[in-house]
Image: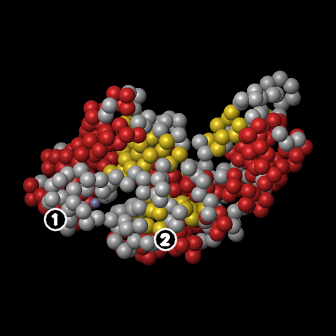
Amino acid sequence: MALAPEEQIQVDASRTWVVGSEGASNAIASSLDAAPLAVIVDLVRTGFADTRPRLAVITGLSRKVVAQRVDQACENGLLKDAGLAHSEGGRQARRLEFNADAGYVFGVLIEASEITLGISDLRGRLLATAHEDWSVDNGPELTMQRVKLHLDALASRTGVARPWGIGVGVPGPVDYSSSRLVSPPIMPGWDGFSARSWLREHYDAPVWVDNDVNVMAIGEWAFGTGSRSDDMLFIKAGTGVGAAIISRGRLLRGQRGAAGDIGHMHVTDDPQVTCRCGQTGCLEAVAGGWSLLEEATRRSGASAMLTAAIADHGHVTLGDIGVAAHEGDPLSLEMLLARAQILGEVAASLVNFVNPGQLVIGGGVLRAGTEPLNRIKDVVLRRSTRLASEGLTVRAASLDQMEGVIGAALLAAENLLAPPALARWVEDASPLGHATALQRHDTAFV
Ligand SMILES: [Zn+2]
């Protein structure tokens, strides 16, 4: 089987192997010198090749060398036999498959008022999850102890002795190169904190930390109901407000990791609108969950349902407001729709700016019934330009609030398995013991 000289095969958005053209052949050749085993595992994992003959064609390695390397990958547990391949005439080849159960990763999503945790295989499929209402106001040490308690319980439940890697999403700006939080407005006591360092003291596994909205977007992009080929704008409206942009499979983090941090965009000149960040007129201060709580508490006397909630447990929660709106409480609905209007207007501007194929809305706002989401949708479609709105899908996040934990797990798995990282440990069959070196690799979704 010969490939056309110009044949180009997209393995995924971050790696394109070009077969037959001179420059690209050199690129492949240098990869092969460094780590033919890693390249073979990667080609099978990314669906680019699933038989030994195909691997030989793509890599240019002899069939004998390919056979040896495939045997080695199978012995290491990274590839496995998957039966006979579909025949195109001639002898049928054995099909190969990536073994996503070769190892497991932890996914951790810390949000302002809840934590969600999961253990997944190397493709981001969850084996077990845990969730707890938990405020980040408890500070980093108590929060991380809580995270560890849940992770250890999940590990013993699933029999996963050691994670291969850990991905973490946090509700504040993360300097992606150092994994440290930088002046997070709604996380008192967390400035400069490194969840990576904390977890590395307790687990011998590499850790990658990102903003919560970024990992939610990764999970939704990988497993959500939309087309994976579409560019995606993900807006999270929960206690805080944030956005993430995936363009052609790449997550746009910007120079330091602050891209998409829309919560503190200036949206009103009203000097009364003060924000937790110290400025006035921020989006979060008029549309975020924490401002909703403040307003609901202040105006609760005008709502029988919110008054009842305070009588029951001493204060109003976002859950109370969602339930009240759902059951027709006029005040709760009014406050939610006012926020949906502003979110819709900001989302329309962002849609005009980045022209996504999908706009996905996630976060606590989804628990308040369909009306706020429909309002956001209406405003976006009305306020965005014709070219940007034609073919645009506006939808709710579709993974039952699990997209963040899946995305965090995928962040770890993809960083472990990207060829440069894989080459470091593939001969050992496991990344255990390579944590420090592997953490320097951050090629997933970039
Ligand atoms: Zn602000």
445 over 359 or under it: above or below: below
Q: Nearer the viewer, residue 346 or 69?
A: 346
**Seen from this angle, which residue lies furthest left?**
302
Q: In which quarter of the image is ligand 1?
A: bottom left
State the residue position of label 1. Answer: 311
| Amino acid identity at mark 2 | Ser
**Seen from this angle, which residue lies furthest top?**
89
411 over 353 or under it: above or below: below
Residue 349: x percent and y percent? 31, 41
Residue 95 can be seen in this image: no
Residue 143's quadrant in the figure?
Answer: bottom left
Residue at mark 1: C-beta within 8 A of ligand 1 = no
Residue 5 can be seen in this image: yes
- Give yes or no for contact between labels 2 and 1 (Cβ–Cβ under 8 Å): no
Classify the position of the N terminus by image quarter.
top right
State the residue position of label 2. Answer: 194
If you read the primary sequence from the N terminus, does the residue marked by circle 2 or circle 1 appear first? 2
| Label total for image | 2
Q: Is mark 2 on a helix, strand or loop?
A: loop
Residue 272: x percent and y percent? 14, 60
* Residue located 34% across and 71% down the image: 188
**Left or right of 407 in this view: 259:** left
Residue 301's quadrant in the figure?
Answer: bottom left
* Residue located 56% across and 50% down the image: 446
336 over 48 or under it: above or below: below
| Amino acid identity at mark 1 | Ala
Q: Is mark 1 on a helix, strand or loop?
A: helix
**Crowding at label 2, few (<14), some or many (≥20) Cα neighbours within 10 Å?**
some
* Residue located 73% across and 56% down the image: 423
* Residue located 81% across and 28% down the image: 2
Residue 411: x percent and y percent? 55, 55
Residue 270: x percent and y percent? 15, 55
